[in-house]
Structure formats: C-alpha cells, structure tokens
Amino acid sequence: MKIQHFLAALLCCFISVSMLQAQSADQPWAVGLSVGKTAYQGDLGSSFFKPEKAFQGNVGLTFSRYLNPTFNIALNGSYGRYGFMQNDQDLSKKITSLNSHEGNFLTNKGQANIMLEFKFNNGWLLPVDFKLSPFLSAGLGAASYTAVDDRGNNNSDFILPVGGGLNYRINDMFNVYWQSTFAYTNGDSVDGVVTETENVFRFGSDDWWMNQVGIKMNIGKTLDSDGDGISDNKDTCPTVPGSVAFMGCPDSDGDGIEDSKDNCPAAAGIAMFGGCPDTDGDGVMDSEDSCPTKKGMAQFMGCPDTDSDGVADHKDNCPTVKGLKANMGCPIQKKVTPTKSTRTTSTRTTTPTYSTPTRTTTTTRTTKVVTTPVTKVVSSSTLSVFKEALDEVKFETGKSVIKTNSFTVLNKVVRIMNEDSAMRLNIEGYTDSQGADNNNLLLSQSRADAVKTYLTSKGISPMRMTATGFGEANPVADNATKEGRAKNRRVEIKAFY
C-alpha cells in the first residue's frame, strides 16, 4: 500500500513542477513508448553484459516536460520480466550458506520513477538545435515484483535510478531515443535469497539494469507572442516583430542592421557608420555632413570644392573659378592705375591800344585729380544689435544647431542688412578650450557657417558675408572657470564697408 501511495505522490509532484514551467518553450511536453531488456545483479550472480542469458523483455512509457535549456523532468514507467538463470560459473560463486533453491527465479516487474535529466545540448556544451542530444539522469522511484514461479518472491522496493541516454531529433515532432538506467534497490529478497542487509541501499542487492529504445512525440502549442513566425523561446525580442536573420529582433529601416545595434534605426544606413546614412555617398555620414545632399570631402565636413582651390563652395565667393584662400576663393584682380585728367584753360586775346600786330596767347595746364575717400562709420545702434547678437546667439551643446530663441536677434541683423546694402559682415566663430583643438576649430567654423546660412535664408546675399572659425583662439575670458568658458563660446558679427 505504501508503494501505491508513493507512486501517486510521484505523479502529483511531476504535474506540479510541470505546471510551473508551462510556457517556457515550444512543445514543452513529450510522450514516448519504448521496448527494452532488464538484467539482474544480486546474490545469485549477474547477467550484466551477458547476452547469452535469457532475454527479460519489458515495455515502457515516458512523459517528459521541458524546464529550461539544461533540464527536463520525466516520469517513466515500465513493465516486464525480471529474473535470472544460473549457469555453472554462477553456481561456483553462489553463497553456499543460502543455497535453498537452484539459483533461478522469475518475476514480473513494474516500476515507476521521476527523473531529472541534464541535457548536453543546452547552448553552452552543444548547440540547442543539435540533432543528437546526450543526457544524464537521476531520480527516485519504486518497483513492485510478482513471482511467476515458486522461487521468486512477491515484493516491493524503493529504487534510486541513475543513467543516461541519447535523443536523436528526426523533426520538430518526433525523436528516437535510447535510455540506460541502473537502479539501486533497498530490497534483497526478490531472488529468494535474503541477507542481513535487507532494506539498505547497497551495490550488490537485487539491483537491475534496464536498457530501452523508443520513440517520443513532442506535443504542445508553439507560443509566438509578437506573431513574427519565430517562437518565443527562440525569439530574442519576443514582444516585437522581427526577422529570422536577427533571431526575431527588428530592423525597422531595412538596412541589414538590427535596431539594437543601429545608431539610426529609423533611417536606412550603412554598417560603416553604425547604421546611419550617408545620402551623398561621400564617406561623411549625414549627421556630420554640412552638405548631406552634395558629395564633398571630409576635410570640408562633407561639402564640395568644385574648383579645387582649397575653399569649400559654401565659403567660396567664386566657387567655379580657382582662387586663393586669402581672397575668399577668388583670383587676384590686376590693379588699375588711376588716370590723370587734363584741363585746358580758355584762350584769351589781348588787344593793345597802340597800333601793333595782333597776338594770341594760349596757356595749357595739366591738373592731377585726387579723390579723398569718405569712410562710412557703423552706427551705434547697429553696433548695439551686434553686441546683443554676441550675447544672445546660442547653439545646441556640442552642435552647430542654432537655438530657436536666437532667431529674434538674428532677424534684427537681417533688417539692418536690408536697410544698408553697402554693409558687409565678418562672422567669426569661437569655442572654449575644452576638447581637442581640431574638433574645436571645426565646431567654430560650422557655427559661423550656420549663422551665415540663416542670414542667407532670409535673403541676404552670401557675397556680402564671410564666415570663419577660429576655434579656441582669442579668448575673452578665463577658460579655467565655467563662466569664462561660457563667454568664450561665441559668434561675433562685425560690420564693415
């Protein structure tokens, strides 16, 4: 009766553990049928590794449940013959004090056990999808014996089964398997020979070794939460639809780089720039390209230099004619020598009162005309606007993006330029001393360019403006303090005629 209660407890334990892991993998359940052979080892001898001994066959049934990639839990049962037939060699080793019968016995054995299986194809010893899956197992169970002849005893034992085996995956539904189980028993009377070690687990009691081959069928519903055709246990991103190529994770922009590794997941790009785009294909990614739609050069932050004079087109006042950097990309024009003007005096005729021949005298004078230029002075009201721009024009941190609250003062500059068509501007960009010198130089240049671009967008001719970056040169305050560095990060707008 105790054995029946124990078997019922095993079944309840198996069901409880299985329910805890009910959603952990595809088709988590498997049921198997097997046939096999049982070999005896005990007081009468051993039939281990002795094929000449009588075949003691059995049939088996197994239910297994996936727990995680490393472990399964299984409930196994079998029923079949269990016995022993001695030969002369065995008789010579028989315990002479216990030779109450010929040394043969035969029973029907039923057994059940719950086993924890350790799988080698767990992803770190062997690949999870490896077709051949070796495993080791150990557990606890019970066996019941019914005598077929008068030599065996009706008996029940607790057993400690240990073993291992191989699964071979035919497809997603079927596996064939071999399982070998050695059972230590706490009984020593089923063979009709009882020793003083009855009810003690020891090697040499009426132990048995069972080998089985069979077929298993996987059952259960595949869970695919995001509906991308990849089951949750194989899906690295189970709640977001993805692709097989990225183990179920998405590639939103379709550039072949999964979103988690894509610095620009919403814009198709290239691996060279971590998934970010380079629209014009000039080797400068768009986020760092001042001219993202025009193929240019890295030294000009992606902008072109059409005439190859070393001055980027957007800073070149003569972008199609090769010129000099010192002359804003334009060639030096020859100086025109000032011309001299000639003034001829009027002709005077003098007639004396006395009678003499009339004589006409003509006097010619050459006069050099000297023009004195008049220097136009920038008004104080204009200077005050430019001073306001120095304080109010701000940029996004580390970028050349003008903050929107700077547009008000820049629009004042636009109005002044529209009212005075002769005015020209020098736009100078500066940074503090934090960071690499070259990076600061590039940042100051791009910020000066940004101001020029804004003014140009409002209708001011780019020919009336120059934009130059000076990096951390010409500081107006101490870079050792936070306040000083803030003052040094500036754009100065200087007017001239």
Image (cartoon, rainbow, N blue to C red):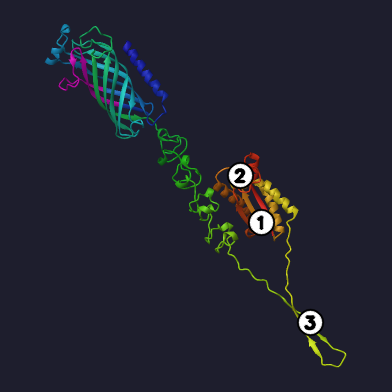
- Residue nearest the observer in this picture, 357 or 98: 357
The residues colored magenta run: 32-59
Mark 1 sits on what residue?
425
Residue 346 badge: 3
Is 46 included in the stretch rendered in magenta?
yes
**Residue at image coords 56%, 62%:** 323
Asked if residue 24 lies left or right of residue 143, the reply is right
Secondary structure at numbered mark 1:
strand
Q: Earlier in the sequence, mark 1 or mark 2?
A: 1
**Residue at image coords 63%, 52%:** 428
Secondary structure at numbered mark 3:
loop
For the residues labelled 1 and 3, the Cα–Cα distance comes to 49 Å
- Disc 1 to disc 3: CB gap under 8 Å: no
Quarter-of-image position of residue 152: top left
Q: What x and y, as percent, mark residue 186?
A: 28, 12
Q: What x and y, as percent, mark residue 420?
A: 71, 59
